[in-house]
Image (cartoon, rainbow, N blue to C red):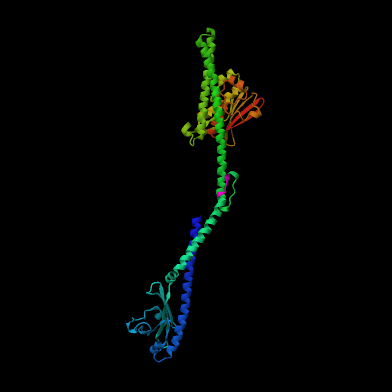
Amino acid sequence: MFKLLAYVSVAVAVVMALGAVLVYQATVVSDARREMQRQAAAIADVVGAEQDPVDAVARISMDGLRVTLISADGTVLYDSQEDAGSLPNHGDRPEVHDALAADDGTGWAERESETLGYVSLYAAQRLANGDVLRLSEERAGLVSVLMGDLLWIGLIVVVLVAVSAAVSHRLARRLVAPVLAIDPAHKARAPYVELGPLVDRLNEQHAELKRQNEQLREADSMRAHFMANVTHELKTPIASIQGAAELIASGICRPEDIGGFAERIYGDARRLSALVSDILLLSKLEAGERARDATKVFGAREPVDLLAVARDVAMSLEPLAERHGVQIRVAGIAAVVDGYPRQLDEICRNLVSNAIRYGGTPVTVRVLERDGHAQLTVTDRGPGVPADEQEKVFERFYRVDKSRSREGGGTGLGLAIVKHAAALNGGTVSLESEPGRCSFTVTF
């Protein structure tokens, strides 16, 4: 800003100086033309009354002016500074030609002088006998004026540069100071109208950075909490397997109890395998959400009929439902979703298996289409989820009834998987619950 202001100031000063010189020069030339034409007319009146024009012109003394008498055919009859016989024909000179042709008998011309930086001015007047009287003089041109006052012009430019630099420096500091004071952390306001969009963008970016930092802190907290939960959830079945195996290996247990310990080991191993599988699946879903192109993780999307998925899941979970004394009902219409078949199956399977384990009979699976959106709803007649815990059920390892959840064989990751899988397929999950009824709805 400082350099720009200084350059503009100096440029303006130089242009103004040149303009002033040009105006001055034009004024001087204009004044000289009027004066020379007046003198030429006065001399012509005197010479025209004489019998011998050449002798009359020769007697006239004109300080600083060159006097030339030219006949109608262009022959130079007299010149106050040169031998007339040595001068060429002047009939082609503009001022002579104009004086001979014009009604008022006057002519005027300006030509670059042989002297560098000067201009020759010519005023011609036609006499009564047809001859032409011409006056001429040299005046300083633009270059000469500039060269003559070069010292003063140089001093003026130096002063202008110094003043411009000082003023520009101070002005630049005053202009920049409010810009440097912009602080998005305190909801900055634009010091100038032109900076309004920039300040608004800075405020938006600061708010976005603040939100991202909060998300990072939450993610770090969730990651630490998740790792603690994973460690705890893994230790429980491992400790059970290890304890049962030690009893069998040490020979302490009776032979008739070995079958029971083996069954415990098998059950805990299945639970451990299910837990590891759910952890890996959840990590994969989160990686898919973060990826710009989830098809690189899960393959291409394809049309999937939710009603067909619901029927397949209900059929595969019939054995589990029978063990818990729960009846599964599937109803609705065909609704096609463009998504990942495996993840849509996981959504339905986790919701139905949760309803079987923790809900009450019957478990109803409905597939509907509302306002152009496909919906999958799983409803059970169990105790429901308390209102103060409904927002927490989608967190990893969160259990409403921890003792009952472990007895049901769940890993505590089912609803977290549902939430992330739904988001990956462009859906949202909602919960409606009251005593005696619990309903999960996924809207795509």
Bounds of the magenta segment: 180-184
Q: Residue furthest left?
A: 86
At x 48% / y 77%, what residue is drawn? 31
Q: Nearer the viewer, residue 334 or 209?
A: 209
Residue 80, relative to residue 235: is it above or below? below
At x 44% / y 86%, what residue is drawn? 43
Q: Nearer the viewer, residue 340 or 239?
A: 239
Image coordinates for residue 351, horizontal then vertical, percent: 58, 26
Quadrant of the rendered image containing residue 391:
top right
Asked whether residue 299 appears in the rendered view, the answer is no
At x 55% / y 46%, what residue is drawn? 202
Image coordinates for residue 78, horizontal then vertical, percent: 37, 85
Q: Residue furthest bottom?
A: 51
Quadrant of the rendered image containing residue 335:
top right
Quarter placement of the C terminus: top right
Image coordinates for residue 286, horizontal then vertical, percent: 52, 31
Residue 98, relative to residue 437: is it above or below? below
Does residue 93 belong to the magenta stretch?
no
Q: Is residue 369 left or right of residue 48?
A: right
Query: Number of marks in the image?
Result: 0
Residue 381, relative to residue 219: is it above or below? above
Q: Residue furthest top?
A: 255
Q: Nearer the viewer, residue 108 or 360?
A: 108
Image coordinates for residue 208, horizontal then vertical, percent: 56, 41
Q: Nearer the viewer, residue 429 or 330?
A: 429
